[in-house]
Every structure is written in structure tokens, then in C-alpha cells.
Amino acid sequence: MTTLRADSSVAELPLFQGEDGGAIPTSALQLKFRPISHITAMIAYRSWHYLGDTDFLSQVDFGCYWNGLLNGAISYGSPNATDLKGYWDRHTQNGWLEIKRLVMSPLCPRNSESRFIGYTIKQILKMMKINGIVTYADSDQGHTGIIYRASGFKYIGLTKKKMDFMVDGKIQQRGKTRGVEGKWIERSRKHLFVKDFRNNQQGG
């Protein structure tokens, strides 16, 4: 069985649930969730997320487990957008979180994502005071955000059109573009969702 070293709480984690022919979960209620390290979360993203091993910054990460095996991850961090009209600007961004990544094994049953999101939001509200959470669904990947609607997020609309600078097939996140060999491509537009807790810190 293929294994990767993860965080200290689980020394060895199989990459794929059920690869040994064992049983798979038949209900989302069978899944267990708990905080994990960013390193462990990256195991899930490398295995099942379309962005693969593209790293990112997060503040808190949770893992989804079945029979002690990693079956998914969700990560929260500071929003990338410096402002979102009606919600925050560069001076009031603190107190807002963004779902940076979410992925689950294809073996997880229906409704697993919404249960995972609901559980982790409740835990975050116990850990810290936040104004709300923002998340995106990538239209280029065929995502429409059904799981976010089911989790009580409000649909805001599509993000604005933007361009990314590509160098050697990868997006250049920072630095100068002048004189650099690369090309500008249109960024995929994303469906934007917000869950606002400012009038209800319990997130109901």
C-alpha cells in the first residue's frame, strides 16, 4: 500500500481510501473530521484536487477520515481579494476567511462536502470571531457551487474578468513581467459565494 509521511498525529497515511479492497463509506455520517497540518492537507490536494501540488497559504486545515484513512481536506485562510463591495475593503479585511481549497476522495458518498463544510465552520466559530467566509467555484472546471448553496452561502455572481501572466506554463504570481518571456491569458471566471456572520455569530 502506498503511504506518505504526514503530520505527527498520523505518522503514515495511505493516499487512497479503499485501495486495499476494504469497505468504503456508504453515508456521509460515517466520516470523521478533525484539524490537521497543512502538510497533511496537501496530501489530499495532490491526490484529488485539480490544482494538484500548487501550494498556498492557509490558517487552519481540516481532514476528512474514514477508518483512519485520509479521504479529503479543507483549508481556510485570508481572502485573496483586497476588497469586496458590501463586505470588506483593505482596511476591514481582518475577520474574513476564504475557503482556499476543498477536496474529497471520489469514494466519499453524497452530501459529504456540505457536511464537511458545516462541521468545520462550526469549529472555526468556536476557535475565533469572524465576520464571514467567502469561497469560489471555478467555472472552467464546470463547478457551479452547488455544495456552497447547500451549505447556506449566498451567491454573489461571477468574478470580474482578469488576465494572468504565464511563464513556462505556470502563472507568475509576483514580480515584474516587462522583459520576461511569457504570455498573458484570460483568467477563468469564478462563481463567488459569501456566508456573512456579522448579524449572527453562530452562523445559523
Image (cartoon, helix red, strand yellow):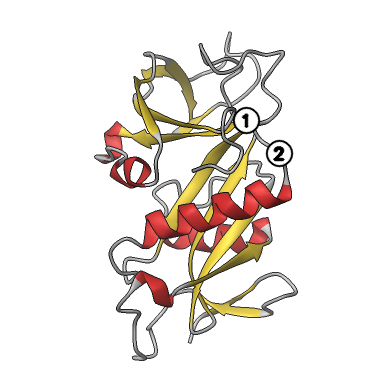
Q: Position of residue 26 (x, y in %)?
A: 30, 78
Q: Tally the marks.
A: 2
Q: What mark, if any, has residue 166 been given in the picture? A: none
The kind of residue on which mark 2 rests is Lys
Horizontal relation, residue 102 to residue 38: left or right: left
Looking at the picture, does residue 90 appear above or below residue 71? above
Horizontal relation, residue 37 to residue 185: left or right: right
Please identify the quarter of the rendering in which residue 68 is found: bottom right
200 and 11: which one is in front? 200
Residue occupying the far top of the picture: 178
Looking at the picture, does residue 38 appear above or below residue 198? below
Q: Residues within 10 Å of mark 2 (few under 14, many from 20)?
A: some
Looking at the picture, does residue 45 appear above or below residue 184? below
177 and 11: which one is in front? 11
Q: Position of residue 192 (x, y in %)?
A: 39, 27
Secondary element at image label 1: loop
The kind of residue on which mark 1 rests is Asn
Residue occupying the far left of the picture: 142
Dot 2 corresponds to which residue? 129
Is residue 168 among what the camera can see? no
Is residue 66 among what the camera can see? yes
Q: Position of residue 2 (x, y in %)?
A: 50, 81
Q: What mark, if any, has residue 131 been given in the picture? A: 1
Alpha-carbon distance for marks 2 and 1? 7 Å
Query: Residue drawn at (75%, 74%), measured in percent from left and top?
Result: 8
Query: Residue drawn at (44%, 46%), measured in percent from left and top?
Result: 51
Horizontal relation, residue 68 to residue 7: left or right: left
Q: Position of residue 74 (x, y in %)?
A: 53, 53
Query: Residue drawn at (69%, 79%), measured in percent from left and top?
Result: 11
Q: Residues within 10 Å of mark 1 (few under 14, many from 20)?
A: many
